[in-house]
Image: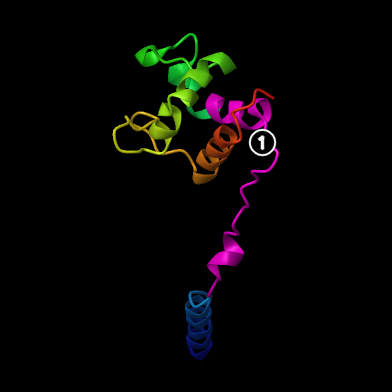
Amino acid sequence: MQVLKTISFISLTLVLLSGCYYDVEEEIYPTIACLTSELSYSMDIVPILQNDCYNCHSEEANFGNVTLEGYEEILEYVNDESLLGVIKHSSGYSPMPKGGAKLLDCEIEKIEIWINDGAINN
């Protein structure tokens, strides 16, 4: 009986001690840098558009009569500043993606920097 109490006490102690483990959030979830130097339309911007925009705004889907597939097509929305307005959820613009979560801050930053750098087709 004494052995059973000892085993129970040790087991309970181990369970309680394992619950006291403390992790440092920065060590568990390190910040991943947003790489924004030397952005390329084809290598950086198009993949964001493919993942987050083309479901509704490809040439085939063309929801809302808005096509973002192709450089000339997206340039229209870059020039009238609506692309940044909708992805940043700015006042006066319909937030995109419609009914979905806002793009990641890094993705928005890449698009904004690409636009501010002249929206080059590279």
Local secondary structure at mark 1 = loop
**Seen from this angle, which residue lies furthest top?**
60
Q: Which image quadrant is residue 90 in?
A: top left
Given residues 6 and 1, the one toward you in this image is 6
- In the image, is residue 19 above or below residue 65? below
Q: Position of residue 52 (x, y in %)?
A: 49, 29
Which residue corresponds to the image point at 50% horizontal and 10% vertical from the top-left? 59
Residue 110 visible in the current orientation? yes
Q: Is residue 121 left or right of residue 15?
A: right
Residue 70 visible in the current orientation? no
Given residues 9 and 119, the one toward you in this image is 119
Q: Position of residue 29 (x, y in %)?
A: 57, 59
Q: Which residue is the site of mark 1?
A: 39
Which residue corresponds to the image point at 61% horizontal and 66% vertical from the top-left? 27
Q: Position of residue 54 (x, y in %)?
A: 50, 20
Q: Is residue 95 left or right of residue 45?
A: left
Q: Position of residue 21 (x, y in %)?
A: 53, 75
Q: Which image quadrant is residue 42 in?
A: top right
Q: Which image quadrant is residue 111 in?
A: top right
Q: Which quadrant: the C terminus?
A: top right
Which stretch appears magenta?
22-50
Q: Amino acid at mark 1?
A: Leu
**Seen from this angle, which residue lies furthest bottom?**
2
